[in-house]
Image (tube, rainbow, N blue to C red):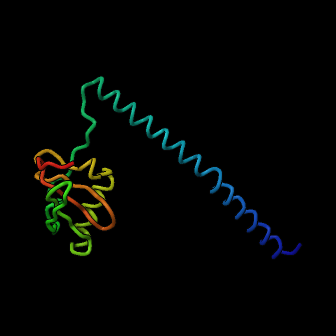
Amino acid sequence: MDEKDIQLVKQIVRETVHEILDAEVYGRILDLLDAVEAGIVGFKQQMANEKGVSTMPTAVKEETFTCLKFELMKGSRIGEYEVAYKQQNAEAQWLHAYNILKQANATIANRYYGEGYGYAYWLYGEDKIYRQKLGQKHS
């Protein structure tokens, strides 16, 4: 075997090891990490309940969202709401607001808001941030 053959064998071994890790190990490691995370969250919630402490994170100032340009919409199920489109807002401001909502897993069923907020915010679809006035009936 010459040097080229040795390099080729090394490359094949490396690629095979990566394929095995991708197919068999990484998925199991991610499953394990998800289970550990769920256990930690449950333990934290249990401890907070026993001590009478809230586990709700403090929300950012609403100005993070109100600086965006929203368009009024109306739906048959949730009534009036507003949408901020990424392309119609300053990228840095929009991404900051989007990342907060993404990290909070804000959905239409789990809206993001804090004390003193006038609106609740959520994500749905690509490049859109939604909001609806708090206290407004929605299904």
Residue 62 in the image: state x and y as whole percent. 15, 55
* Residue 75 higher or lower than 136, as above or below: below
Q: Residue at x 26, y 75 (%)?
A: 87
Residue located 33% across and 53% down the image: 103
Q: Which quadrant of the structure image shows residue 70? A: bottom left
Q: Nearer the viewer, residue 4 or 14?
A: 14
Which residue is most to the right?
A: 1
Left of 130 or right of it: where is 20?
Answer: right
Residue nearest the viewer, comparing 71 with 79: 79
Q: Is residue 116 left or right of residue 41?
A: left
Residue 73, image x and y in percent? Answer: 16, 65
Position of 40 with respect to 67 (left or right) is right
* Front position in the image: 4 or 12: 12
Q: How many numbered dots are placed on residues in this image? A: 0
Residue at image coords 22%, 44%: 58
Instruction: Give percent across and percent down for residue 9.
Output: 80, 68
Is 32 on the left or on the right of 102, as rendered? right
Judging depth in this view, the residue of 29 and 132 nearest the camera is 132
- Of all residues, the one furthest to the top in this rendering is 50
Q: Residue furthest front?
A: 76
Q: Percent from the top left, x then y, of residue 117? A: 12, 50
Residue 129 position by quadrant: bottom left
Give the answer, above or below, for where 88 lies relative to 105: below
Depicted 70 relative to depicted 34: above or below = below
Picture quarter with the N terminus: bottom right
